[in-house]
Every structure is written in structure tokens, then in C-alpha cells.
Image (tube, rainbow, N blue to C red):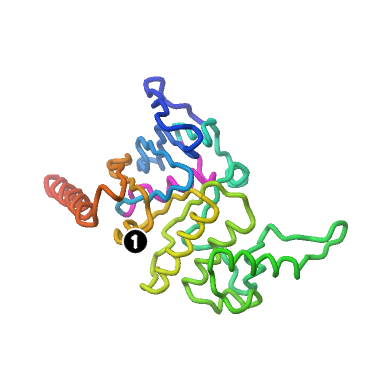
Amino acid sequence: MPSASPAASIVPAIRRPETEVLRVEHIAKRFGPVVALRDINLHLDKGEVLGLLGDNGSGKSTLIKILAGFQRPDSGQVYVHGRRVELRSVDQARALGIECVYQDLALIDQLSVSANLFLRREQVHRGLPLLKRRQMREQARMALDEIGIHIPSVDARVGHLSGGQRQAIAVARTIATSVADVLLLDEPLAAMGAKEGAMILDVIARVREQRRVSMIMIAHNYAHVMEICDRINLIQDGCIALDTATADTSVKDLTEIVVAEYERARATARAR
């Protein structure tokens, strides 16, 4: 993997190491002639929910995939708990405490709730190729109850559940079967109605309060962002164009910034 340009300076950490769980500096990524990320710098504190905003194609999902170990950047550095790391795979990212819930959820409709919660992490009896089904069901119920996910039976097939319940199970799977410090949420509220969206926001809030898990959440609904996120980063032109606490901005401010970007893009297209 190419190293960062010698001219690219490392930004000194100005936050206390004991509070910062993740930092990225000068991350760049290209796909052929397409520049997905130009120069991304962001940080995440313990127990913080960071809202990641940006237009379609701005590079939000690319950044999430890099942090999850699914893709490798062309340049830049990633620090986990102050230590520089190279995320070479999803398994390595998980070992460092970074988990991701993708938009497609990666659930298997034909399997039960408990089977999905332990998918690829099944518990087996020592020395025997037999699953600890009762133990996994009991742990699945405890995990769902802990973060307030109300599903009548952990034996129910996931394909029979609502979109909100499925999303909640994807979040619960990450929390129940790992020791995640950082949870990456790729549009967890996409295509959901108001009731289901509120349920997922409640789940996210409880996970933060009970587990002190730090989160980066991609979202398009600014009202959702203002409700659940502590801070907002906006990606424009492959860089972080805005880094602000939600208390210091508003839905109106965010809308005006995005509208201004759209108008600049339209003016540039007309001038060509």
C-alpha cells in the first residue's frame, strides 16, 4: 500500500488519548480516474455518535468500508486508541474492536433470529461438531432484551420480521457477539417509516448508554442526525468540509450548506 506523501504532515492529537478511540488522517482513495476520497481527517471519542453526511457519491460508504477493513486506502493513516494500524481485512478490524452494520444487513431470511445473531460465530460443544442451540437462544434473548428489542421469539425466521426489526437484529448481532469499541452504521434508517426509524434510534441510544460504544452513522435525514448524534462531519469534494457539534448547528443550517453545494455544482456544469 502506498504511503502518504512526504509533504503530508501528521496533525498532532489535541484530544486526550483516553477519550479518543479512532482517528484517521489524510485518507485518500481512487477507483481508476474517480477520486472517492481526497483528504479525509476525522476523529471519534469514547461513547460518541458521529453523523457522517454528504451527497450521494461523496465517499461516505467508501470511508466506512476502509474503516471496516473491507477496502484499503491508497494513502493516509488510521489510529485506534492512539496506535497506528493498517486495516488489512475485516477480521483484523474486528480484532481491533471495529464492527460494521452494512445497509444490506447480511442477514439470512431462512434462519432464525438466534441463528442470525451467531452467524459465523456459532458456539459448539467441545470436541463435538454439535451446536449449543439452547445456549445461543438464551444468549440471543438476553442480548435483545438488554437493548430493548422486542421480538416475540428468537426462533422466528428473520424473513418474517419487519425492516426495523431486521435492522435492530443486525445491530444486536454486532453487540452481542463481539467486544466492539467502534460501531459503523451504513444508513441504518434507510427506507424506514417514522415508527421503525424511531425504534432504531432508541436502540442506538441504548447501545451507547449501556455499552459506551462509539459510533459513526451515515444518514440523510437531518432530523435523525440532530436527535441522535453528538457531532456532525460533512464530506464534500472528498474532504471533511464541516466538523461541528450538533448543538452548534441546525437542520436549517445543514440544508443551506447542501443547497449551496448543489448550486455550485449546477453552475459549474452549465459553464462547461
Residue 67 in magenta stretch: yes
Q: Nearer the viewer, residue 73 or 226?
A: 226
Residue at figure coordinates x 31%, y 42% from the top left: 243
Q: Is label 1 in a helix, a strand or a loop?
A: helix
Q: Position of residue 140 (x, y in %)?
A: 65, 67
What residue range appears in magenta? 56-73
- Left or right of residue 157: residue 163: left
Residue farthest along the front direction in this orientation: 209
Residue 28 in magenta stretch: no
Q: Position of residue 271 (x, y in %)?
A: 11, 45
Instruction: Using the image, determine if residue 59 lies above or below residue 157.
Output: above
- Left or right of residue 50: residue 17: right
- Left or right of residue 74: residue 142: right
Q: Quadrant of the C terminus?
A: top left
Residue 121 position by quadrant: bottom right
Residue 23 position by quadrant: top left
Residue farthest along the top direction in this orientation: 6
Amino acid marked by disc 1: His
Instruction: Using the image, determine if residue 238 lies above or below residue 259.
Output: above
Q: Nearer the viewer, residue 134 or 104?
A: 134
Instruction: Using the image, determine if residue 136 lies above or below residue 46.
Output: below
Residue at figure coordinates x 55%, y 34% from the top left: 86
Q: How many marks?
A: 1
Q: Which residue is mark 1?
A: 224
Residue at figure coordinates x 78%, y 65% from the top left: 131
Q: Position of residue 62 (x, y in %)?
A: 43, 47
Near mark 1 (Cα within 10 A), the count class, few <14, some 14-19 or many ≥20, is some
Q: Position of residue 123 (x, y in %)?
A: 75, 60
- Left or right of residue 115: residue 72: left
